[in-house]
């Protein structure tokens, strides 16, 4: 439960890092971020906002909504301390970043992380899932006496993990290919060089296939 709460708080900070939001808009964007399988209720959102307020990572201001009603709303903004905390958390590559409750949130903000951070998190997640897959396949052996529906559930779980393993493998290959392409790109010509005597060829784009997200 604590891990889910931390993941939600990280998602809130990430969205507020982009712009201030009121509660309704924040919940809507969180639902888009977390995916269709996890609809966020206000009963989960507002306790998270209170924890972030107490920690000093966000603040709330009163804003007047446009339109005829001119109704006042509470808008949440990230603080400098919140930005610092978000930056520290989003670059953490430890085991907590590989877990189900936090990996998707971190992946959603990969554009704000360096390539080496992305690669370490992806590799850690792949290692975690491969361990899970090995356990599931091992436990399925000799289970001929299982209930039919229990067997189907196990098969479905194994196939789901196998799909994610392939997806992660494709992403990792794409990240590595991108790094190699960047390393092979020639340096820009110096200003004092004769441009007519120098030809710079661009490195070919990486030809890596990435898997689809949910």
Image (cartoon, grey):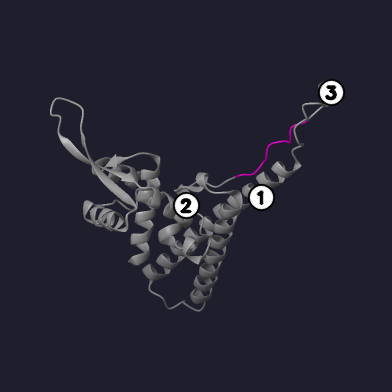
Residue 101 is a magenta residue: no
Of labels 2 and 1, the one closer to you: 2
Residue density around tag 3, few if under 14, some if 14–19, many if 20 or more, within 10 Å: few
Front-lying residue, 21 or 140: 21
Q: Which residue is mark 1?
A: 176
Q: Which residue is mark 3?
A: 194
Q: Residue at x 44, y 67 (%)?
A: 154
**Residues at circles 3 and 2 in contact by the CB criterion of under 8 Å:** no
Name the spot of residue 133 as percent of width and height, x first: 52, 67
Q: Which residue is mark 2?
A: 87
Q: Residue at x 67, y 41 (%)?
A: 207
Name the spot of residue 84 as percent of width and height, x first: 44, 52
How much space separates mark 3 and mark 1, taking CA atoms? Answer: 34 Å
Name the spot of residue 6 as percent of width and height, x first: 37, 60
Residue density around tag 1, few if under 14, some if 14–19, many if 20 or more, within 10 Å: some
Chain-order first, disc 2 or disc 1: 2
How much space separates mark 3 and mark 2, taking CA atoms? Answer: 43 Å
Q: Residue at x 18, y 26 (%)?
A: 67
Label of residue 48 in the image: none
Front-lying residue, 2 or 38: 2
Chain-order first, disc 3 or disc 1: 1
Q: Which residues are magenta?
A: 201-209
How much space separates mark 2 and mark 1, taking CA atoms? Answer: 23 Å
Q: How many marks?
A: 3
Chain-order first, disc 3 or disc 2: 2
Q: Residue at x 53, y 75 (%)?
A: 138
The answer to whether any part of residue 122 appears in the image is yes
């Amino acid at each position: 439960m604590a891990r889910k709460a931390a993941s939600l708080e990280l998602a809130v900070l990430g969205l507020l890092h982009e712009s201030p939001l009121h509660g309704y808009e924040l919940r809507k964007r969180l639902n888009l971020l977390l995916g269709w399988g996890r609809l966020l209720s206000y009963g989960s959102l507002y306790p998270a906002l209170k924890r972030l307020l107490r920690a000093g990572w966000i603040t709330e201001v009163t804003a007047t909504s446009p339109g005829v009603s001119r109704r006042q709303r509470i808008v949440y903004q990230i603080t400098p301390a919140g930005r610092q905390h978000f930056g520290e958390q989003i670059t953490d590559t430890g085991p907590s970043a590989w877990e189900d409750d936090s990996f998707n949130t971190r992946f959603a903000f990969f554009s704000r992380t360096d390539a080496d951070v992305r690669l370490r998190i992806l590799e850690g997640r792949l290692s975690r899932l491969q361990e899970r897959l090995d356990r599931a396949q091992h436990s399925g052996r000799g289970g001929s006496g299982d209930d039919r529906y229990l067997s189907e559930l196990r098969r479905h779980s194994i196939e789901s993990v196998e799909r994610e393993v392939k997806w992660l493998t494709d992403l990792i290959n794409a990240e590595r290919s991108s790094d190699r392409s960047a390393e092979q790109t020639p340096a820009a010509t110096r200003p004092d060089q004769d441009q007519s005597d120098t030809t710079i060829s661009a490195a070919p784009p990486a030809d890596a296939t990435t898997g689809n997200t949910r």
